[in-house]
Image (cartoon, helix red, strand yellow):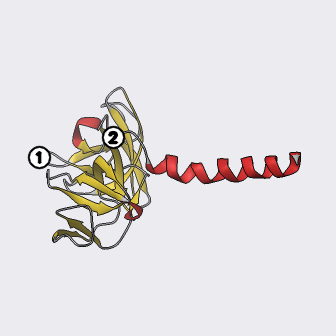
Amino acid sequence: MGARLFIFILLFVGMTGPVQAQDREVPYWASIRASVLNMRVGPSADYKIDWVYRRPGLPVKVLRLMEGWRLIEDPDGARGWVVARLLDPARGAIVIGDGLADMRASDSPQAPLKWRIEPGVVGALGDCEDGWCEFAVGNRAGYIRESRLWGAGEP
């Protein structure tokens, strides 16, 4: 009897993990996982498609959860519903603002300049501290001012 109870408890605990991962507290950041993602006007495939994203890695802000669907906001402020499984919890960011953004070798304005990045470039977001964020685009990585990245900071 003790072994059966132990197995039942293990199975129960194992089943709650994915459910808890999907029920994060909103708002939170995510990124587009799919190569094509339909944003709909409501939380069901029955609703009209309002926008089609074709940009994996694009950061989005998740505003609301509903049974396998997520209400998101994109960097342009557009809002709509997407299928939750097509979002990635890995954080990404997009360069914003006017002009080129400096990518530095470390988190200092005096650090050597590595590259200059155009607004609209999407990359992987690392840790942010003291107004600087680790940012990687392909095989290029460095630090960019947090103020030049949408997807950094608190959602």
Callout 1 touching callout 2 (CB < 8 Å): no
Q: Nearer the viewer, residue 83 or 54?
A: 83
Q: For numbered disc 2, what is the local secondary structure?
A: loop
The residue lying at 14 percent from left, 53 percent from top is 76
The x, y position of residue 139, in whole percent, is 44, 59
Say which label, 1 or 2, has the lower sequence index: 2
Residue 130 vertical placement versus 44 (above, below): above
Residue sitting at 80 percent across and 47 percent down?
5
Circle 1 residue? 98
Looking at the picture, how far across and down is residue 103, in whole percent?
32, 45
* Label 2 crowd bin: few (<14), some (14–19), many (20+), radius 10 Å: few
Q: Residue 26 bears which disc, if any?
A: 2
Indicate which disc residue 3 carries: none
* Residue 31 occupies quadrant: bottom left
Residue at image position (36%, 38%) is 133
Secondary structure under the numbered disc 1 in the rendered image? loop
Q: Nearer the viewer, residue 47 or 151?
A: 47
- From the viewer's perspective, is the residue at label 1 or at label 2 nearer? 2
Q: Position of residue 85 (x, y in %)?
A: 41, 63
Going by the numbered disc 1, the residue's amino acid type is: Asp
Query: Is 118 left or right of 18, judged from the image as shown?
Result: left
Q: Residue furthest left?
A: 98
Query: Farthest residue in the top direction?
Result: 130
Q: Amino acid at mark 2?
A: Val
Q: Distance of mark 1 from mark 2, alpha carbons?
A: 30 Å
